[in-house]
Amino acid sequence: MRQKFFFFLISILIIFTYTGPVLSEPVLEIKNFQPSELSERKLIWPDWRLPSSIKRPRLQDDLIYPDWFEGVWDVISEIEGDKNQEPIIHSAKFNYNTSGNLIADREYNTKSYALSTRTGDFLSVKNDPKSPNRQFAKLTNDRYLETKIIGRLQEKIDNNIFITDELILQILHTPEFSRVSQVETLTEFKKCRSNQNNEINLSDFNICGEQFQAIYNQPGQNLISLPIKTEKSRLILRKTND
């Protein structure tokens, strides 16, 4: 259970997560879609390897979301193929920063997600005030989870599709040892209808997504790293009612 908790927590530390049976909702019509670098990487999952083409972010760089992510969303996340794992329901928030860019409230989102897992391991989380790419989570039994985003690529395909890929360095600190690994998360977001009828209301939509993850060993062990664990989730975001 704890191993799953750490894997889940990395999801939200990188971005956040979503969905369950509601994913049968139809996606808004996508026209003139052209394959992109990240959509092609999605297609070859789980046959990923490192190094890849994602770029190292600068100290103050953050993941910038399209304007249609603005606000607070109710989020459902469900792992594909795991009948024993219940969907995780939490909240995600996206705000504009002082530069006018829409970013995730990573501290809020991490706390909401971690508390929703009900494992009891999570105590608190803090962002690094010097960089949005680093975060510290305090766990039970004098353990700390340090995460640092060391690679990022994002693509806005059109006004309906947004794809992100982030590589995170994860360090679990315990009184006895520190364990280092790398986690890559690629997520494709799409606008989807908020109801089951054929009418499309562009001012009232959900965000559906697919999330692909891979865990690698710590860097430096081999010239080419292959995943030691992979996981896929279905996601959905519904705008929170005021």
Image: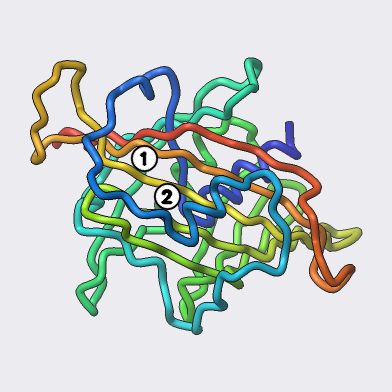
Establish if 31 lies above or below 144.
Answer: above
Task: Give 46 or 110, whichever is nearer the viewer.
Answer: 46
Q: Which residue is mark 2?
A: 109
Establish if 96 lies above or below 113.
Answer: below
Image coords of residue 170 (percent x, y) = 70, 61
Q: Are marks 2 and 1 in contact (CB under 8 Å)?
A: yes
Q: Residue at x 36, y 58 (%)?
A: 105
Q: Residue at x 64, y 32 (%)?
A: 119
- Which tag, 2 or 1, sits closer to the chain's start? 1
Quarter of the figure with residue 120: top right
Image coords of residue 147 (percent x, y) = 63, 64
Secondary structure of the residue carrying numbered label 1:
strand
Q: Which residue is mark 1?
A: 91
Q: Residue at x 40, y 66 (%)?
A: 63
Image coords of residue 55 (percent x, y) = 55, 75
Task: Give 110 or 144, whichever is nearer the viewer.
Answer: 110
How far is disc 2 from disc 1 in space, using C-alphas? 7 Å
Q: Residue at x 56, y 78 (%)?
A: 56
In the image: residue 70, left or right of residue 124: left
| Amino acid tagged 1 | Ser
In the image: residue 194, left or right of residue 151: left
| Amino acid tagged 2 | Asn
Secondary structure of the residue carrying numbered label 2:
helix
Of the 4 image quadrants, the one containing the N terminus is top right
Neighbours of disc 2 within 10 Å: few (<14), some (14-19), many (20+): many
Marker disc for residue 8: none
